[in-house]
Image: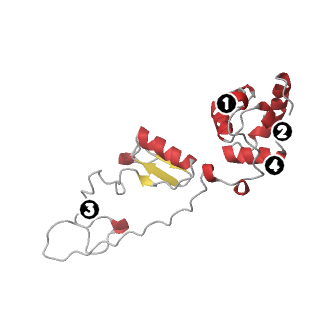
Amino acid sequence: MGACCNAPMLQINDDYFEDLTPETMEKLLQELREGREVKVGSQVGRFASARADGPHTLTDLPDRASPSGILLSDSSDDEEEEEAPTPQAAPSKPEAPKPEVREADTAAGSRPAGLAAPRDGKADNLKKIKGLGPKAEEGLNALGVFHFDQIAAWSAAEVDWVGSELGFSGRIEREDWVGQAKALAAEEGKSA
């Protein structure tokens, strides 16, 4: 991707994230999941493709403003050097709502009723629903959904809200989680 000395790097949409380590990559992905504003470009403060300890080339630039704010010569000529223009900060992106504080009206549909904890202290194994894995189960539990009969009772608006909230747009309908949950709740003697 042309990162050269700025590798390893990652492109997400139009933004480039450079000088990544496993730790900074994980932090970056977590901040994106949480809807936080992230630092674009070098994650170590590198300027353009300069060496990590700063630019060491282009010391004999003509006596004019430098392109892209590249440092002008640091030689001690008798002539006064022009000060490089201060780079303009890129306009910040609007902050996305954080999932933990997102209200029902910012997501599609309406939020289903949740429980503070599983009934009788024992949650159903929601992973029995085809297409619902450990991460999805964790997300549902965080929303107060612990039992098949809760999912079986979801309306279309509630399916939309959960799909939007957990990033499963269309998946819940495609895999018929509500129908599967109704069958599983009936097997366990719970009505929807």
* Residue at numbered disc 2: 153
Mark nearer the N terminus (2 vs 3): 3
Asked whether residue 176 is in view, the answer is no
Q: Which mark is residue 133?
A: 1
Q: On the picture, is 134 further left or further right than 160? A: left
Mark nearer the N terminus (1 vs 3): 3
Task: Please tell me in which quadrant of the rendered image residue 112 appears.
Answer: top right
**Label 3, label 4: how many angstroms apart (C-alpha)?**
60 Å
Q: Which mark is residue 117?
A: none
**Label 2, label 4: how many angstroms apart (C-alpha)?**
11 Å
Q: On the picture, is 131 further left or further right than 178? A: left
**Which is in the foreground here, disc 1 or disc 2?**
2
Mark nearer the N terminus (1 vs 2): 1
**Is 130 situated above or below 99?**
above
Q: Nearer the viewer, residue 113 or 180?
A: 113
What's the residue type where badge 1 is placed? Gly
* Residue at numbered disc 3: 58
User: How would you rate the neighbour count of disc 4 (Cα within 10 Å): few for under 14, some for 14-19, many for 20 or more?
Assistant: some
Q: Which mark is residue 157?
A: 4
**Is 162 situated above or below 179?**
below
Quadrant placement of the C terminus = top right
Q: Nearer the viewer, residue 186 or 34?
A: 186
Q: Residue furthest front?
A: 120
Q: On the picture, is 71 further left or further right than 184? A: left
Asked whether residue 18 is in view, the answer is yes
x, y percentage for residue 122? 69, 27
